[in-house]
Image (spheres, helix red, strand yellow):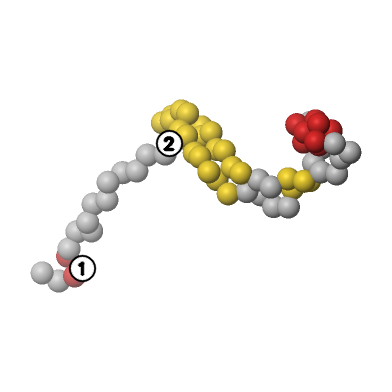
């Protein structure tokens, strides 16, 4: 059979799915402080500095919706 007469292979129809993911990553932060307690308080309030974004260490699927 000539190539022009062949029917194209059928592909399965794909659907789009949206997900809500909970992603945890480990980051290295630093802060200058007078004591351990002060450093902990500063870091807990987000007033530290981080060198780079960390790697993902845990990913959990929370919800999956069909569009």
The image shows residue 55 at horizontal and vertical percentages of: 58, 49
For this orientation, the residue located farthest to the right is 34
Q: CA distance from mark 1 to mark 2?
A: 36 Å
Q: Nearer the viewer, mark 1 or mark 2?
A: 2
Say above or below: 33 vs 11. above
Under circle 2, the secondary element is strand
**In the foreground, 67 or 60:** 60
For this orientation, the residue located farthest to the left is 1
Badge number at residue 17: 2
Residue at left offset 19%, top offset 70%:
3
Under circle 1, the secondary element is helix
**In the foreground, 13 or 53:** 53
Q: Residues within 10 Å of mark 2 (few under 14, many from 20)?
A: few
Badge number at residue 4: 1
Q: Which callout, 1 or 2, points at the residue further toward the start of the chain?
A: 1
In which quarter of the view is residue 26 placed?
Answer: top right
In which quarter of the view is residue 25 placed?
Answer: top right
Residue at left offset 27%, top offset 46%:
12
The image shows residue 57 at horizontal and vertical percentages of: 53, 43
**Left or right placement of residue 12 versus residue 65 in this view:** left
Q: Is residue 16 visible?
A: yes
Looking at the rendered structure, the number of numbered marks drawn on it comes to 2
Say above or below: 13 vs 60. below
**Left or right placement of residue 22 versus residue 5 in this view:** right
Quick one: quadrant of the N terminus?
bottom left
């Amino acid at each position: 059979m000539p190539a022009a007469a062949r029917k194209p292979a059928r592909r399965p129809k794909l659907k789009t799915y949206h997900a809500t993911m909970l992603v945890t990553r480990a980051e290295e932060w630093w802060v200058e402080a007078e004591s351990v307690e002060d450093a902990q308080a500063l870091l807990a309030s987000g007033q530290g500095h981080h060198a780079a974004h960390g790697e993902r260490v845990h990913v959990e699927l929370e919800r999956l919706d069909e569009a």
